[in-house]
Image (tube, rainbow, N blue to C red):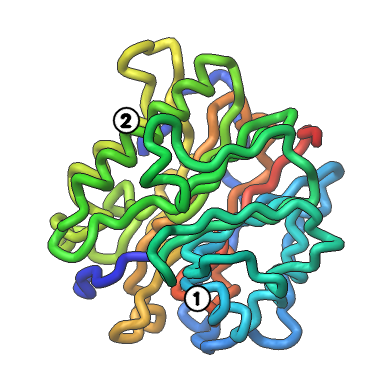
Amino acid sequence: MPPKRKVNNNDTTPNTEKKVKKSTAFVAFDPSLPNNMTFPDPLVISDEDKKTPGCVTIASYNVASLNACIKKGFNKYIDAEDADIVCIQETKVNAPVSTAVNDKVYKYRYWAFEEKKGYGGIAVFSKHKPSQVIYGLEGYESISRGRVILLTYPSFTLIACYSPNAGDKLVRLGEKQTFDAAMEKQIRSLQQKGIPVIWTGDLNVAHEPDDLARPDSNERSAGYTIEERTDFTKILSPYEKDPSVPGLVDSWRYLHPNAKGHYTYFSYRFRCREKLLGWRLDYFCLTPDLLPKMINSSIRYEVWGASDHVPIVLLLKDVSF
């Protein structure tokens, strides 16, 4: 989540022979959707794609303080989504929270903490046991341990991520670029080993002009600088050092290449949700070999009230645990 992003806020799709439908039904953002500050009870999620035989759901959600989110209904979302794997970002805790999820449902829980108290932090809750869990990016552990968890499953490696924010006046832009370079190196290393990759989380970048409400007035705002967008484009493009290694696919944009006005983050300042002044900062990026397994990639627009982000979900088929 950008700390103080300008409020005057509005793909590269790799070629692949393995095509999936690009005209998937999705919920268009409706200005009449609730602007409540807690989740309704009950919270109901209707998703026909989940009825697909063998459907697996992976959810990602920047909770903007887990303890606060729990008070506003986080557990209602967890129960309603019933995802196989849940990745959360910006927990702002420094120890596991026992009330986050039902440990009988999510038997495998992994937490990463920032050294600074009440800052950053991520967690992954899974119904399925990964064969390996790694904290942080190789060669960059000191800064990334509280921001990255890699989980290895038989069908893919999941990289749960909370990317750094470039900061007010871009004071941390250099740190963000260093992180992006380390992330690309990690992803390419997995790709060169033939391992399918899912990279998800709040990546703190709006890649294209259609990914934020007011691009023209935010060209030097954190999350939309040319430096950050170029770094993201590099990961979505063939590897410069080995062009035989394909770029990752922004799954939502792949399915909706020309869609505008679809955002995952709305600043609380100036009631941006009501004014539709949002940013699409949360992603599921996939290696192209996973596209035939993708059922859908969705933004849960209606799940608003416990964070300044909304969750995103990736639905897959034919994957094993």
**Residue 124: percent from the left, percent from the top?**
63, 53
Residue 256 appears in the rendering: no
Q: Residues within 10 Å of mark 2 (few under 14, many from 20)?
A: some
- Of the 4 image quadrants, the one containing the C terminus is top right
Helix or strand or loop: what does disc 1 sit on? Answer: loop
**Residue 264: percent from the left, percent from the top?**
45, 64
In the drawing, what numbered circle is on residue 234?
Answer: 2
Q: Residue at x 60, y 56 (%)?
A: 111
Please name the amino acid that badge 1 sits on: Ser
Q: Residues within 10 Å of mark 1 (few under 14, many from 20)?
A: many
**Residue 319: percent from the left, percent from the top?**
76, 34
Please name the amino acid that badge 2 sits on: Lys
Horizontal side of residue 62 vs 170, given as left or right:
right
Residue at label 1?
A: 307
- Of the 4 image quadrants, the one containing the N terminus is bottom left
Q: Residue at x 77, y 62 (%)?
A: 82
